[in-house]
Amino acid sequence: MDRISWKEKKKNKEVLEGIGLKHTELLKTVKTRQLAYCGHIRRHQSLQKSIMEGKINGKRQHGRKRKSWLGNIEETTTRLINECCEVALDREEWRDTIASNIWQETEQHCTAQLPCSDIWELWYRFREERNRSSWV
């Protein structure tokens, strides 16, 4: 984003702080959207639901287990997936669950100073400045 080479070995957190964002604000947005999409998928019968919740026949590879979609949902909500599936059927209750989980998480970790709505504005401003400086 800021033309930082991987050779500089800067952490993501440092890069985001350099442009005025905090790491936790982006994570909050991603997790909120992930949970909202999960609720949407749970409420409808579709191919997407079958794919997200389906199991593939066969043997798994050696080594550490890969993270799964449902595992991430359990981790974010701190509930068992069966409970999540039941709660997601009621849209209002699922929205409350999302809000409470994200609120608790950001209270514990958040040092963010920018609201989510300013992220795109900041990105467009950054892009304009970069384009102006490259042609000078």
Image: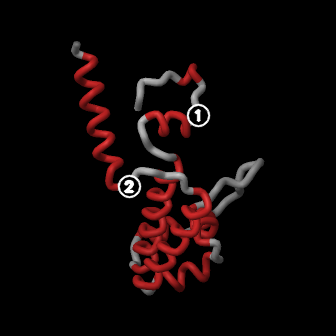
Mark 1 and mark 2 residues within 8 Å of each other at the beta carbon: no
Q: Nearer the viewer, residue 108 or 99?
A: 108
Q: Is residue 112 left or right of residue 124?
A: right
* Residue drawn at x 40%, y 78% as measured from the top left: 45
The residue carrying mark 2 is 116
How many labels, in total? 2
Q: Nearer the viewer, residue 72 or 48?
A: 72
Q: Residues within 10 Å of mark 1 (few under 14, many from 20)?
A: few
Q: Residues within 10 Å of mark 2 (few under 14, many from 20)?
A: some
Q: Amino acid at mark 1?
A: Lys
SS label for mark 1: loop
Q: Nearer the viewer, residue 69 or 106?
A: 106
As displayed, is residue 75 above or below residue 126?
below
- Which quarter shows the N terminus? top left
Q: Earlier in the sequence, mark 1 or mark 2?
A: 1
Q: Residue furthest right?
A: 63
* Residue drawn at x 55%, y 39% as measured from the top left: 13
As displayed, is residue 112 above or below residue 34?
above
Q: Amino acid at mark 2?
A: Cys
As displayed, is residue 113 above or below residue 39?
above
**Label 1 to label 2, Cα distance in Å?**
21 Å
As displayed, is residue 6 above or below residue 54?
above
Q: Position of residue 88 (x, y in %)?
A: 48, 80
- Which quarter shows the C terminus? top left
* Residue drawn at x 29%, y 32% as measured from the top left: 127
Q: Position of residue 50 (x, y in %)?
A: 48, 71
The residue carrying mark 1 is 11
SS label for mark 2: loop
Q: Position of residue 85 (x, y in %)?
A: 54, 80
Q: Position of residue 60 (x, y in %)?
A: 70, 55
